[in-house]
Image: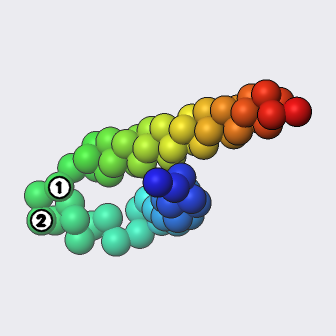
Amino acid sequence: NSTSIQEMFRRVSEQFTAMFRRKAFLHWYTGEGMDEMEFTEAESNMNDLVSEYQQYQDATAENDEYEDEEQE
């Protein structure tokens, strides 16, 4: 498994945040019944996902360092 997908998630999140702050295209979604809070929640979920992947990546890096020290 790889944690490199987090970079793509991070880019999408940054693009979403930029557009959402400008409320770009928001009227199309609210006009169909969505609430702005759903977008805020989705943004939060995406940020949580990126953080979780980062934790796994950090843990893997620490584990690799520990294994390297044991081999020396």
- One can see residue 14 in this view: no
The 10 Å Cα crowd at callout 1, few under 14, some 14 to 19, many 20 or more, is few
Q: Quadrant of residue 28?
A: bottom left
Quadrant location of residue 63? Answer: top right
The residue tagged with tag 2: helix, strand or loop?
loop
Residue behind mark 2: 32
In-image side of 5 versus 44 (left or right): right
Residue 59: mark in rendering: none
Say above or below: 22 vs 48. Answer: below
Give amino acid for label 1. Answer: Met
Gap between marks 1 and 2, in whole Å? 6 Å
Percent across and percent down for residue 54 are: 58, 42
Residue 12 x, y percent position in the rendering: 49, 64
| Residue 13 placement (x, y as % from top left) | 49, 57
Question: Which residue has dot 1 on it?
Answer: 34
Q: Residue furthest front?
A: 71
Q: How many C-alpha atoms fall within 10 Å of the one at disc 2: few (<14), some, or many (≥20)?
A: few
